[in-house]
Image (cartoon, rainbow, N blue to C red):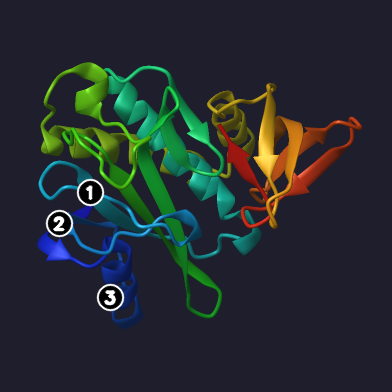
Amino acid sequence: MHIVKLNATTSTNTYLKEYARELDFKEDILVWTHAQVEGRGQRGAIWESEPGKNLTFSVFKRVEGFRADRTFYMSMAASLMVVETLEHFGVRQLAVKWPNDILAGARKICGILIETIIRDGLYGVILGVGINVNQKVFEKAPRATSVLLETGRVTDLNEVLDYFIKSFYKYAELVSQFDFARLHQLYEQQLFRKDKVSTFELPGGKHIAGVINGVSKNGKLILQLEDELLKEFDLKEIKLLY
């Protein structure tokens, strides 16, 4: 893997997308920045990160020949990469809040944003990862946490990145082998509030109760509603309240 380190950039995902338009990448590329001034999350959220305290990086991987309707398996793999990395550094009570926020207990410790590159079909994916490592105070995200807050120890960012890269290739291998059943199983084992009654918000503010049954192969959340029927929702259709 080729690693590029930047002092600052608007967004590592944006940086890689711009270069992917111009270059024909032959290898995996990871862009890591000391300061990301316009980090992005799901639903257009802004990612808060104190410069030099956390890991903010993006990885480009070519996936030519990979069916576009299977891209959520890359999201599953990315979530598992992060969970395994954080477990290694002593973080406990980890879970994946659908689709790919990583929680420690009920506090967010990592966000993942996945984007695709199209060139006469699916060409590559960019995994944008923000891991809170040594930050103590979160002014804009009061429900956030970090490796430091969870373990009481300052952790070397290079060590976390090195371990993530090992986990990246472990789970990317499952994707390349089309071992989707295994990925799906491992992902659902980590799914936050699976098989528990939870409250969800629909567009417009209506609240409903349901039980998370799992996730479909194309990434939709499967809920068992009060009438015991199963219904699928995408990210724009429902929000878990917790």
- Position of the C terminus by quadrant: top right
Neighbourhood count class around disc 3 (C-alpha, 10 Å): few under 14, some 14–19, many 20 upward:
few
In the picture provided, is 86 more to the left or to the right than 98? left
Depth check, front residue: 15 or 60: 15
Rendering coords of residue 1 (x, y %): 23, 52
Q: Who comes first in sequence, dot 3 or dot 1?
A: 3
- Determine contact: label 2, label 3, CB under 8 Å: no
Q: Which residue is mark 2?
A: 35
Give the labeled residue for mark 1. Answer: 49
Residue drawn at x 42%, y 18% is: 93
Residue type of the residue flagged with mark 3: Tyr
Given the image, on which type of amino acid does mark 1 rest?
A: Ser
**Residue 25 point in image, percent of width and height:** 30, 69
Residue 100 position within the rendered picture, expressed as x and y whole percent measured from the top left: 49, 43
Question: Residue shown at 61%/61% (left/top)?
Answer: 67
Q: Using the numbered discs, state the Cα–Cα distance from disc 2 to disc 1 in whole angstroms.
A: 8 Å
